Image (tube, grey):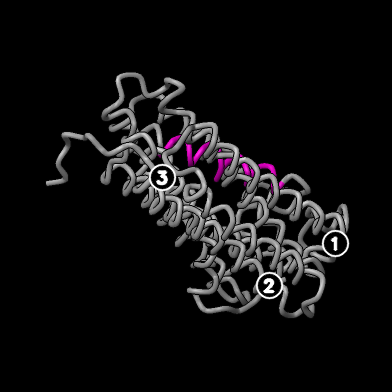
Amino acid sequence: MYRSDPLWKALAFPSLMMGIGAVLAGNSSAQVHGNAEFFPATICLVFVIFAQLAANCYTRYREVLYSMGYDASLPIRKANNTTPGYDKAMFYRVFSFGLALMSLMAGLTLVSMGGIWFGVVGVFILVCGWLMVGGSTPLLLSPWGSVFTFILFGPVTVISTCLLQSAHEATDPLSWFDISPSLFMSGIVGFMCANSYLVYVYGNYYIYKDTLGDTFTATFGRKATRILVLVNSFLAFGIFVWACFYLKLVNPLLASSPSVICLIINIYIWWQMKHLPKYKLSTLAVIASLNVFIMGLVASIVAAFVGIPDDSHMQIF
């Protein structure tokens, strides 16, 4: 269902908190063992922001075409300048292309810094991103949307951000010592981002059920979605606490504090999913995305106290 929203709403800025939080979580993973680097982390952040904005804008383009009765997988020339909504659709399409170019520029910078393997990661992100929002059957509107959200924002974003920073200082960035924090954190962030997606489709259940696709909630029901959100929340919490003790951090109780904060927020979201009126459920998706950002931010702050001191010889200027 198409909604005539202003541009700032069409770009879904609150959803950016997922990508920003994932990058911050990757930064905290590098920081734990003294490998954090400001500049590579910043470029990762720029790439994720523009990539998400491009995907959000293209998603709104599809919604406009759908509301006009056209198939978004077909060329837009089926419409014409006198068709209501055509100019809006063209604007979203062109704007998403411009944002994608910005993300490509940042991505090429990352490849120049990290080498050919980051080019392979970039191609994987491009393919997965298109499968999620493009084509005739976008995966975001399928029961598998949460799986791909887990992969892109969890392992891909977190591990790549950590490796890019570790590669500047670590002798072997793929050693278990340097990469292990990001492996744990990738699962944590992946489950939390999957929750953010599930809460979003749960809040828009009646829209997607009758119009746009078969999301997880439309396929398995509202109760199954609430159960999965709760399971994901405790999995993220359990992995975080176990990792803090496994990695033998200086103060594992302090180190695990971000997981406690985020678990409380996740339980609040789960509780409200059942009790909030239908027209207010969409606000929970904003809270779920913000929760990922809180995880990444607090984890980065705590890592400064419980991690190994940074012995980097690099200078920003």
Numbered circle sitting on residue 280 = none
Residue stretch rendered in magenta on the structure: 145-161
Q: Is residue 38 above or below residue 291?
A: above
N-term mark: 1 or 3: 3
Q: Is 299 situated left or right of 43 in this image?
A: right
Q: Which amino acid is tagged 2?
A: Ser
Q: Residues within 10 Å of mark 2 (few under 14, many from 20)?
A: some
Q: CA distance from mark 1 to mark 2?
A: 14 Å
Measured as percent of width and height from the top left, residue 290 is found at 54, 64
Q: Which amino acid is tagged 1?
A: Arg
N-term mark: 3 or 2: 3
Q: Which amino acid is tagged 3?
A: Ser
Q: Is residue 74 above or below residue 119?
A: below
Q: Is residue 189 above or below residue 61?
A: above
Measured as percent of width and height from the top left, residue 155 is found at 55, 37
Q: Quadrant of residue 277?
A: bottom right
Label 3 sits on residue: 28
